[in-house]
């Protein structure tokens, strides 16, 4: 089966611009997660979708970040306007079950650099 | 504040040596997962432990979950250059059942031939 796919793999934008990251989960996985790793820090949870609904968005840093999952398939994460501190690697992960012992299948990440 | 403390952050050893990576917390976890990440790729699950005191083995890797489910360790026996990579522990807190994981900072392991 195809794994989790993220696009683009790299993005370099200027402060104030907008960037949209895309994630295609494994087919049939209702649970989709966004995580982020900024330089020198641990990977941190951003939000969790169950199908098209936001189950938990407690990790979203502020209202410059907007995540959507229309139709419950692929998801997008938009940053508008981007700030320098938004630089990092954004990971998407999917799982068939959103339980405490469900393994997450991660994509290769999008490396975002804001200059 | 780091909820899940992972140590050491960096480890450079010779082939054939043994090593242990630790993850510690003051919080109780429903489960603890260990991932391995290669450069340019996403984390890949190695194992999940869910029961206090549980021990799981994966070839030369031994994973243990603490009795109180607040800590875990990864022990590698006779490390090989192919074990080189970033090892991550990640836990699901008991009060969050939605699959949200708390990650440790990771251990960058380098095994020299």
Image (cartoon, coloured by chain):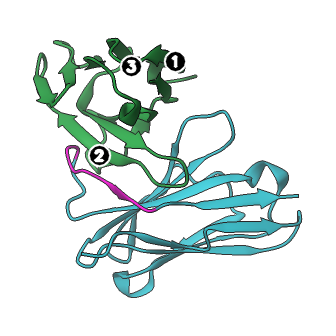
Kindly tell me whether residue B109 is visible in this rendering.
yes
Q: Which chain is cyan?
A: A
Image quarter (top left, top right, bottom left or bottom right) of the N terminus of chain A: bottom left
Q: Are marks 1 and 3 on the same chain?
A: yes
Q: Nearer the viewer, mark 2 or mark 3?
A: 3
Q: Are marks 1 and 2 on the same chain?
A: yes
Question: Up-down: is A84 above or below A54?
Answer: above
Tell me, yes or no, whether the highlighted magenta stretch contains residue A101: yes
The residue that label 1 is drawn on is B12
Which quadrant of the structure image shows residue B75?
top left
Which quadrant of the structure image shows residue B87?
top left
Q: Secondary structure at mark 1?
A: strand
| Residue pictured at 12% horizontal, 27% vertical | B56
Cα distance, mark 1 to mark 2? 22 Å
- Measured from the top left, where is residue A54 in percent x and y? 42, 67
- The mark that comes first in sequence, 2 or 3, is 3
Tell me, yes or no, whether the highlighted magenta stretch contains residue A32: no
Q: Are marks 1 and 3 in contact (CB under 8 Å)?
A: no
Which residues are the magenta region?
A: A100-107
Q: Are marks 2 and 3 on the same chain?
A: yes
Q: Secondary structure at mark 3?
A: loop
Q: Which chain is green?
A: B
Q: Closest to the observer: B19 or A60?
A: B19
Residue A107 relative to residue A86: left or right: left
Residue B90 relative to residue A86: left or right: left
- Measured from the top left, where is residue B50 in percent x and y? 15, 32
The residue that label 3 is drawn on is B15
| Residue pictured at 88% horizontal, 67% vertical | A16
Checking the image for residue A88, the label placed there is none
């Amino acid at each position: 089966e195809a794994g989790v796919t993220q696009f683009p793999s790299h993005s370099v934008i200027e402060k104030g611009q907008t960037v949209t990251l895309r994630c295609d989960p494994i087919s049939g996985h209702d649970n989709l997660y966004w995580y982020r790793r900024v330089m020198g820090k641990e990977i941190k949870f951003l939000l969790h979708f169950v199908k098209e609904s936001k189950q938990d968005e407690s990790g979203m840093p502020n209202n410059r970040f907007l995540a959507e999952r229309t139709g419950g398939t692929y998801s997008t994460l938009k940053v508008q306007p981007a700030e320098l501190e938004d630089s990092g690697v954004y990971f998407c992960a999917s799982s068939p079950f959103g339980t405490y012992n469900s393994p997450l299948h991660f994509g290769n990440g999008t490396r975002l650099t804001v200059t | 504040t780091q909820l899940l403390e992972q140590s050491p952050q960096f480890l450079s050893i010779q082939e054939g040596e043994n090593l242990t990576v630790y993850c510690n917390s003051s919080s109780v976890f429903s489960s603890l997962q260990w991932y391995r990440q290669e450069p340019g790729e996403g984390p890949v699950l190695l194992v999940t432990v869910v029961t206090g005191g549980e021990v799981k083995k994966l070839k030369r890797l031994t994973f243990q979950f603490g009795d109180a489910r607040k800590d875990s360790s990864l022990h590698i026996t006779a490390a090989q250059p192919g074990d080189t990579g970033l090892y991550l522990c990640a836990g699901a807190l008991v009060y969050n059942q939605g699959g949200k994981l708390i990650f440790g900072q990771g251990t960058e392991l380098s095994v020299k031939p």
